[in-house]
Image (cartoon, coloured by chain):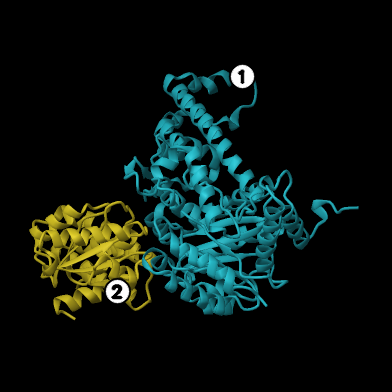
Chain colours: A cyan, B yellow
Amino acid sequence: MEKQWEEMSSDEKQEARFAKWLSPEGVEFVSPEAEKLYKERATRIKDAIQLKKLPDRVPVMLIPSFFPAFYSGLTPLDVMYDYEKANNAWKKFYVDFQPDAHFGCVAPGPGRFFDILDYKLYKYPGHGVAPESTYQCIEGEYMMADEYDAFLQDPSHFFTTTVLPRIFGALEPFKQLPNLTTINEMYGSGITFFQYGLPDVQAAFKALLDAGSEALKWMGYFGAFMKELPELGFPAGQGGYTKAPYDILGDTLRGTRGIMTDIYRQPEKLIEAMDKMTPFWIQKGVIEANMNANPLIFLPLHKGADGFLSDEQYKKFYWPYLRKILLGLIDEGVVPFMWAEGGSNSRLEVICDLPKGKTAWLFDDVDMIRAKEILGDVACVAGNMPMDLLTVGTPEQVKEYAKKLIDNCGKGGGYIMANCAFFDNVKPENVRAMVDFTKEYGIYK
Amino acid sequence: MAEDLIGTLADLEEKEALEIVNRRLSAGEAPLGILDDGRRAMEIVGKRFADGEYFIPDLIYSGEILKSINEIVKPKLAEAGEVKHLGKVVIGTVAGDIHDIGKDIVVFMLDVSGFEVYDLGVDVPAQKFIDTIKESGAPIVGLSGFLTLAYDSMKQTIQAMKDANLRDKVRVMIGGGQITKEIMKYTGADAYGRDAMAGVSLAKKWTGTE
């Protein structure tokens, strides 16, 4: 009899998740060849991550920003608003370049959804930046220095009545909403609900419903894409995403300056808030891994980069809470796939404190030889193909760099070729060189 | 005797630093002296950052403390003191890019190193660079960009300098997340820097103030 999920070890859970991903339910492959490709690709990635078996060759991933749009002669604005065009462009990209995994077509997001809610956290094509530009976060404090207590007391209510009204103009009236945690007996209940009758609050809910409809419509396209790509032979390289607690607080709540000041002025509050966030974000990763039957959960890492924290600060504020998230995911058999943006040279000796074969680390800027040396025994390393080469270099230069990466990091498995950062308008021939060269040179004999 | 504001501020002891400021002001000391100490403390902070002893949070926090000190001192200030500068630098994040953390660090380091910095902010159109270069007569321009889309924006900004016959009057340095020597060549810049210290040493080299 099969073991119950609760009785399984984390190793067994990981195997079970990989098994589901390798033989996906409900996927009707377009051809026997597509099925063969899918299984080979998924197995290749699994082997590179688990560090148990040598893969047949170095896997290669392409994780684009708006490149598929540019490649199809479209602007980011076009694909944010025309979901069908987005699907076609992203599909064309994966089919033309044939990497070992696909990463959905989530980048374009549903443009109209953001319009309806009057999104203020980012500038995006047609809204503060040109149609040819990508969306960009507006640095700021969306949670103030003196709001930690309110956040800690009730994060959900704080988000609903304080954060959402700041980042969505249409939800500003939510500032008035009552805390329904105190609904208890008949007496007084009516009083607690009167705000829901206010015209501006009702208009905000109307916007919320409209935004929901738009998101659902977009999800229809997105869902179709997520179904079609495996059928064409591409396993999804990502089942969802989660984040490091320090980034959660620092990226879009306290802001870079805010959180860096909190380190000195109110370190205990910051730590308490990160502790509070941790279970939410472990759960998010597990739920998404379950929903998409995919063990790989992405973690874009931002504010723990070299220089952004001292070594001591990194060990006190960043790593312990990120590690809690990672161990929480690993316990459930989920595979955290980190994308360490910025420099990581000073972090390698710290982050190698992890169980073996459970994580992958995609690096932007790092000495890859040292990364392999220090991390290679416990984790798969990935990435590092530089943006400058892909953008202004030649295919020959790209191949030369790819050769170095494979020679230095590919030894014994445990390396995935990938771009070092999300890419927009790079040269297609360079992307092609990166993929084709890896397929040719990266074979393990 | 004046208490050691310089050391206290450079060590990022916020509470003590503010107390010293208040005590010195109540003792009747001139605000200019306090601000001068603040400036000297920032020089030490900058030096510690350059030496790898301080990190970005230390820079940000020292700036926050200095802001608080200025708030206390400024109302009592009759006139601003004249500071002698090493040279002028025009700097900004190029058009289409709104990232400013890296650029702000470079501005901070140039400022504490004695340069007069014209910080044009983010998403700066080429024309704004041209206008400011003309008005200020600055011989150094810094272009910042985080996105790879900034490569072309930098290139266009430098082209605009050529078109305005300014290119041979200024030296251009570029910097940002994905900026390398290849991108320097691509954009037509004179130099690039991987960090804020590189920006300062380029500015010093170019102004002959090394």
Q: How many marks?
A: 2
Q: Residues within 10 Å of mark 1 (few under 14, many from 20)?
A: few
Q: Quadrant of the N terminus of chain B?
A: bottom left
Q: Is the residue at mark 1 from the same chain as the one at mark 2? A: no
* Amino acid type indicated by mark 1: Tyr
Farthest-out residue, right: A1
Residue A428: quadrant of the picture: bottom left
Question: Would you say B201 lies left or right of A10 here?
Answer: left
Q: Nearer the viewer, residue B165 or A192?
A: B165
- The answer to whether residue B69 shows anywhere in this view is no
Position of residue A347 measured from the top left corner of the image (x, y, whole percent): 51, 72
- The answer to whether residue A402 shows anywhere in this view is yes
User: Chain letter of disc 2?
Assistant: B
Position of residue B11 measured from the top left corner of the image (x, y, whole percent): 34, 71
Q: Nearer the viewer, residue A141 or B88?
A: B88
* Amino acid type indicated by mark 2: Met
The structure residue drawn at horizontal position 35% and vertical position 62%, both measured from the top left corner, is: B61
Q: Nearer the viewer, mark 1 or mark 2?
A: 2
User: Chain letter of disc 1?
Assistant: A
Residue with the mark numbered 1? A187
SS type, badge 2: helix
The structure residue drawn at horizontal position 53% and vertical position 29%, both measured from the top left corner, is: A213
The structure residue drawn at horizontal position 14% and vertical position 57%, both measured from the top left corner, is: B130
**Where residue B197 is drawn, which disc sits there?**
2
**Where residue A421 is drawn, which disc sits there?**
none
Residue B64: quadrant of the picture: bottom left
Position of residue B196 measured from the top left corner of the image (x, y, whole percent): 30, 70
